[in-house]
Image: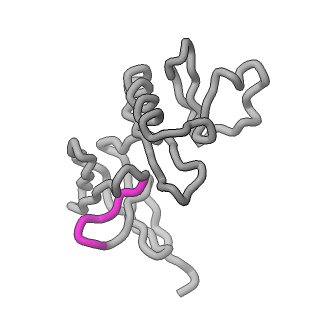
Amino acid sequence: MIYVKFENNLPVAAVTNGHASWLNAEEHENYQSRWDWKSFEEVEQIAANLSKATGSSWLGVDRGESVFPRFDVIAAPTVGSPVSEGFNGDYRPCGTIVQITKKLQVTTSTGAKFRRVKNTATWCRVNGGGSMVDGHIDRYNPHF
């Protein structure tokens, strides 16, 4: 989970893969997470301000009405990151990201193209197939 540190009501830093246990009581009020955000507009603004403050790209996420917590902030894909394609529990390396368009369509070094599904944190392969996942993973579903 990502925790965002706020100073003077502006996001200034992000801690990824954090756990609430590392925050002491005094620090906790300066941090927010997906459990605190109530609208897509709010997470878009947090992502934009966090991008300015950290120099890294961040995106607001809306997982949909049936998911709680619904809103989140994620790190945007970056050129040079290793990725894999996952489908039905199988994962295979898919090269590294070589291009990201303004509409967040990703092209990998193997020629695979993925597009973001609405405002979610999911990138699906263009023309069908699996989803893009972070890192090189070579694993098959043992249930088949």
- In this rendering, the answer to whether 70 lies above or below 52 is below
Q: Quadrant of the N terminus?
A: top right
Closer to us: 142 or 88 = 88
- Please tell me which residue is depicted at 44% across the width and 41% down the height of the picture: 40
Left/right placement of residue 94 relative to residue 64 reads left
Q: Position of residue 19 (x, y in %)?
A: 69, 39
- Please tell me which residue is depicted at 38% across the width and 64% down the height of the picture: 131
Q: Position of residue 106 (x, y in %)?
A: 26, 52
Closer to us: 36 or 122 = 36
Whether 71 is among the magenta residues is no
**Residue found at the far bottom of this picture:** 144
- In this rendering, the answer to whether 128 lies above or below 19 is below
- Quarter of the view holding residue 4: top right
Whether 127 is among the magenta residues is yes
- Please tell me which residue is depicted at 56% across the width and 15% down the height of the picture: 7
What is the basis of the colouring in this image?
one colour
- Quarter of the view holding residue 36: top right
Left/right placement of residue 132 relative to residue 6 reads left
Q: What's drawn in magenta, residue-wise?
A: 121-128
